[in-house]
Image (spheres, grey):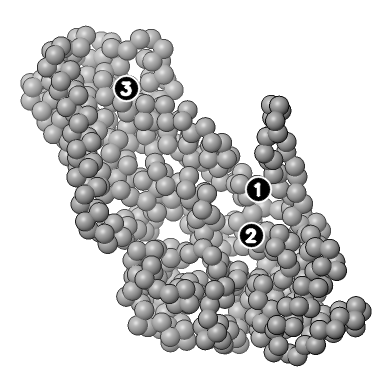
Amino acid sequence: MNTIHLYLRSMAMLLKSHLQYPTSFFMQTLAQLVMEGGELMVVILVVDRFENLGRWAGGNLYFFFGLMSVSFYLTELFGRGITGDFPSMVRTGKLDTLLLRPRGILTQVFCSGMDPRRITCIGVGVAALVMGSIKSGVEWSFLKALALCESIVMSCLLILGLFMIEGILCIHSVKSVELVNAITYGGRSACQYPIDVFPRPLRILFSVVAPFAMTMHVPAAYILGKPLYGWPLWTVFVTPLSGVVVFFIMTILFNKGIKFYRSTGS
Amino acid sequence: MHYIEINGLRKTFVVKKKREKGKLFRKKETVEALKDVSFSVEKGELLGYIGPNGAGKSTTVKILSGILTPDGGEVSVGGRVPWKDRKEYVKHIGVVFGQRSQLWWDVPILDSYSLLKDIYRIQTDDYKDRLEELTDALQIEELLRTPLRLLSLGQRMKAELCGSLLHRPELLFLDEPTIGLDAVSKLALRDFLKRENAEHGTTVMLTTHDMEDIAALCSRVLVLGHGRKLYDGRLQTLLEQYDYDHKVSARYEDEDSGNIDHLIASMYKELDL
């Protein structure tokens, strides 16, 4: 309970820090809107040109796009400490300061970063979700709403877990972070589109290694009324749990990494 | 049983060297930062810890504050082992790095303090009392609503000190606290440290290159060089002994730091550090 309280207070303080520079904050938030809006335009153009992609109609594609945007940028908004700031914490020695406080390292890393500018990206994502669900004629039910919520939460955990790999690697002073970016940022770009339009190797990558397909595409396909691979209903609620599994495993490895840091001093 | 006991402390680092031409892998080299260092500190002592750059001072402080795990040797601080059960241990210590801030850059320092209150789980009443006491002693009351980034170097150091003492640590590590401070701020800071030490019995371990700091504050100095302990005792004795042994012509008096610097410098050279 105390930890959540601490997290919320830290977030409030970070927001205050960001608002210390109002013009810069406003401009950057606007820039984010243009950036993510541009991404959505690409999808709109694709839909305009081809009308459908495999068995997915235009509206379906908006829905997939929206799901990815909302999940990815929610993670960046609340978990910036993990998704962006951690490598610099190791480099500048901020991690040492965190080690001097009587709190878990992961908690403190979470508490030391947020990126409120992402709010516009999330806005674009929500717009895409709404547009997609109207165009696809989704009939919302309690189960579908539940599936959507679970999908977003699990996807956030998955993305956090994947970014933690980057953190773990940078503790071991490995500079080849690009490899991890291939599944984090690469995963974001690729999995804006449903998994079954990809060739087999990519399908395996994003189902098993970085299971975006499990946390996003299985539930989304169910919501859109076109179950992925014809899988039964229970899979919609079980496969997204892979997100929490990845997060859990990475938490353990992350703490191992901190142990390593403490014995080598990076 | 002493408050801090260190026995045969060892720490080596693996340093990767720059890749040489024509070689596929980088050479690795182990650097022994600490080779068998032992000493003990009593509760309430003000200890100066000096030595040339790269002598292993920071490594010792990092081990004592629980950031680093040593390769060998025993350490006990108030009956606890620093690198075991980190969360429990760090509640009892405070650390100030002269070059590194632990407060939040863009918000008023009062906000930083109140977040530290939550981090250390300090009771509200206790926090209020302590904050008032510290702001009085450090004279930073009018700075509390100013963001850290707008403070001068001296003000910032005071703010850092206040932040690291809020949870009433038994043991305070100071890493070059007076670096870049003007004469007035330095004196004020020293006075404060003396008072804190006298009133609360806080054990203070000070690493610095400023011999004046040591002369003014520390009853005892520890000289470290190449990862080994070279001297442990009173500063005055160290200087007299060295002066006598080596017939260095430098004249020094208690407060005359210029000459102390000369003497220490010639001592470092003599010992080939």
Q: Residues within 10 Å of mark 3 (few under 14, many from 20)?
A: some
- Camera-side residue: A143 or A118? A118
Quarter of the image with the N terminus of chain B is bottom right
Q: Which class describes the residues within 10 Å of circle 1: few (<14), some (14-19), or many (20+)?
A: some
Residue B217: x %, y % from top left: 66, 84
Q: Are discs 3 and 2 both within one chain?
A: no
In which chain is the residue bearing label 1? Answer: A
- The reply to whether residue A144 is in sight is no
Q: Quadrant of residue B65?
A: bottom right
Which chain does tag 3 point to?
A: A
Which residue lies at the image location 47% right of the left edge and 36% below the top edge? A166
Q: Residues within 10 Å of mark 2 (few under 14, many from 20)?
A: many
Residue B115's place in the image compared with A79, above or below, is below
Q: Which residue is mark 1?
A: A263
B89 vs A64, nearest the viewer = A64
> Whole-Å distance between the Cαs marked 3 and 2?
44 Å
Residue at 35%, 26% (x, y): give it. Answer: A187
Secondary structure beneath disc 3? helix
Question: Secondary structure beneath disc 1?
Answer: helix
Q: The disc labelled 3 sits on which kind of residue?
A: Ala
What amino acid does circle 2 point to?
Answer: Lys
Circle 2 SS class: helix
Residue A79 sits above or below residue A157 on the image? below
Q: What residue would you read off at disc 3? A: A190
Q: Amino acid at mark 1?
A: Ser
Q: Which mark is residue B62?
A: 2
| Callouts 2 and 1 in the same chain | no
